[in-house]
Image: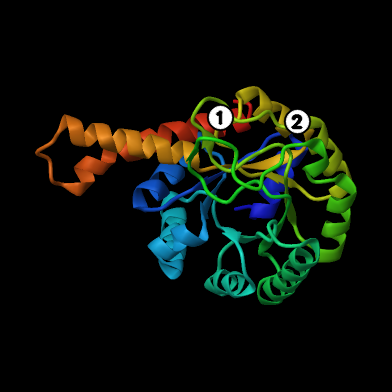
Amino acid sequence: MKTAKEYILEAQKNKKALGHFNVSNMEGVWAVSRAAKSLNLPVFIGVSEGERDFIGIKEIRAIVTAVKEDLDHPIFLNADHTYSFDRVKEVVDAGFDSVIIDGAKLSAEDNLKLTQESVQYAKSKNPNILIEGELGYIGQSSKLLNELPEGVNLDPKSLTHPDVAKDFVNKTGIDLLAPAVGNIHGMLKGGGNPALNIERVKEIGEAAGVPLVLHGGSGSSDEDFANAIEAGISIIHINTEIRVAYRDALKKSLQDEPDEISPYKIAKPAMVAMQKVIENRIKLFNRS
C-alpha cells in the first residue's frame, strides 16, 4: 500500500484531491471508511482536538488502524487543527499519520516558532509523518454561521501571500500548507460560502513548492472545488456538511420511530446519510 505522501503527490500530479472528513464517533468512522472503500479511493479521517478528546486519542488510533486492516484500504488518520506543542507531541507519540499545526491566530513569529518546534519533534520520532502548517485565519469551528467568523477578513490583502507562504515553508520544513484563500470554517445559513480566490491558490501553489490543503470546504460550490483543484489544491477538508447530514438524519430517525430504543437502529440512518455526502464529495474531488 502506498504512503499518504505518495497518494497526495499522485493526486497533485493528476489534478485531483484527496478527501479529508472529520469524525466524532464510530458512525463517522464507518461512513468515511465505507465511502472510500466503495469508490476504491484513499481518504483521510480527521479528528480535531475536541473530537479526539471525546473519542480518545489512543482509541481513535486503534479504531482507524483496525478498520484500515479489516477493509484492506488506504485510510489515514490526521490530527486536525492542533494548537500547541504538547498536543502535537501526544498525537505524534500515539502514531497518527499526519498532524496540522494551527498557529494561524498567533503572531507570525509565534506561528513560525510553534511550527518549527513541532516539525523538529515529529520528524525525530517518525520521519514519515506528514506535518501541515497553516497561514491565514479562517475561523476555528465547523458549525452553521449567521455571518463570517469573527476575525476573518476576505480582502485579498488579508489572504495568504505567496512570498510569505514560500518563506514559511522554507523555514519550517512542513510537508503541506493550508492557506487562507477566501475559505472559511463552517457554513453560512443564508446560502453558499464566499467564492474562493482561485488565482491566489495558483500563486501560492507555485511559490510554496508543497501540496496545498483547503480547509473549510463545506459550503463551497462544486465549481470552486474543481477550479481550486486545477489550481493546486491536493486535499480538501469537509466537516460541517457531514455534521448537518448526521443531525438531520438522526432527527428524522427519532421522529419516524419514536418508540425505538436501540442505539444502532436509531443511528444507522445518520451513518448512511453521512456516507452519501462523503461519497459525493470524493467523486467530485476525483473528477469521477
**Kind of residue sitting beneath label 2:** Glu
Q: Secondary structure at mark 1?
A: helix
Say if residue 61 shows up in the picture: yes
Mark 2, mark 1: which one is toward the viewer?
A: 2
Gap between marks 2 and 1 measured at Cα: 15 Å
Identity of the residue drawn at 36% across and 39% down: 246
**Residue 175: % across, % down:** 75, 57
User: Which residue is the site of mark 2?
Assistant: 230
Helix or strand or loop: what does disc 2 sit on?
A: helix
Q: Is residue 88 above or below residue 244?
A: below
Q: Earlier in the sequence, mark 2 or mark 1?
A: 2
Residue at left offset 32%, top offset 38%: 270
Quadrant of the image for the C terminus? Answer: top right
**Which class describes the residues within 10 Å of circle 2: few (<14), some (14-19), or many (20+)?**
some
- Residue denoted by label 1: 283
How many circles with numbers are drawn on the protein? 2
Residue at 56% across / 40% down in the picture? 41
Relative to 150, residue 269 above or below: above
Q: Position of residue 60 (x, y in %)?
A: 43, 62
